[in-house]
């Protein structure tokens, strides 16, 4: 056997030994914590659950990630994000029979802690207003952050070169939404952009 084959066999054996040791040690003290074992089992699934844009990996920070897409579903609305380094596309589907309203004027696009207004693309001179999503229909818009637009110059939301250096970008999108006659609530979506390994 070559050294490489021995190493490939030794790694899973070592991991299994550590997991059994943790399990037996906790069991000895009448505590059965399976969270560490579940973490090791769930780790391969979380590595695959990501959205890839060129050399960058974009994940939800708090919501469950799905392979190949950034989608969050609540009881009334489905939010789908299609990011790239210049603009992000947002698709919002109304799953209920009631009308929903998105207040684009109060929405925010936060990049690495710097808050700015969310701008819909193509950029217009008129202020953003509320938009109605009829029951069982959807809207889609391409957007960016106002701090990235200076005159005719357009800066990127995240830079692949910076991400490659081991850095990460933190991006948040805040969308004020109201459904039927209910009060407006703010949906906050936090994302982490890292290098593809």
Image: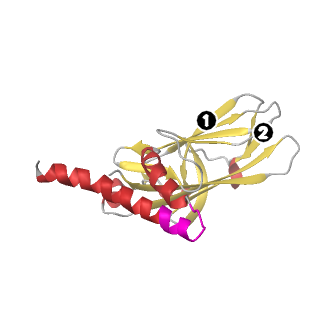
Q: Residue furthest top?
A: 136
Check disc 1 and report its element: helix, strand or loop: strand
Q: Which mark is residue 100?
A: 2
Q: Nearer the viewer, residue 56 or 46?
A: 46
Measuring from the top left, give residue 26's x and y in whole percent. Answer: 53, 67
Query: Does residue 152 appear in this view?
Result: no
**Does 25 sit left or right of 104 as displayed?**
left
Query: Does residue 26 appear in this view?
Result: yes
User: Does 30 lie within the magenta span?
Assistant: yes
Q: Residue at x 34, y 61 (%)?
A: 162
User: Does 45 lie within the magenta span?
Assistant: no
Can you say whether 6 is above or below 114 in the image?
A: above
Check disc 2 and report its element: helix, strand or loop: strand
Q: Which residue is mark 1?
A: 140
Which range of residues does the magenta coloring cover? 23-33
**Does 164 sit left or right of 28 as displayed?**
left
């Amino acid at each position: 056997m070559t050294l490489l084959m021995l190493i490939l066999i030794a790694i899973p054996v070592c991991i299994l030994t550590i997991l059994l040791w943790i399990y037996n040690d906790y069991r000895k003290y009448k505590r059965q914590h399976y969270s560490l074992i579940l973490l090791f089992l769930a780790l391969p699934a979380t590595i695959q659950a990501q959205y890839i844009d060129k050399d960058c990996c974009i994940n939800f920070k708090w919501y469950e990630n799905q392979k190949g897409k950034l989608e969050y579903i609540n009881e009334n609305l489905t939010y789908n994000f299609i990011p790239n380094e210049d603009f992000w596309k947002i698709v919002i589907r109304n799953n209920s029979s009631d009308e929903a309203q998105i207040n684009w004027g109060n929405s925010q696009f936060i990049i690495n802690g710097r808050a700015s207004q969310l701008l819909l693309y193509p950029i217009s001179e008129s202020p953003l207003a509320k938009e109605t999503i009829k029951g069982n229909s959807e809207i889609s818009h391409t957007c960016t952050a106002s701090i990235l637009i200076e005159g005719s110059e357009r800066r990127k939301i995240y830079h692949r070169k910076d991400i490659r250096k081991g850095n990460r970008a933190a991006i948040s999108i805040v969308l004020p939404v109201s459904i039927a006659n209910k009060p407006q609530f703010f949906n906050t979506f936090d994302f982490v952009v890292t290098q593809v390994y």
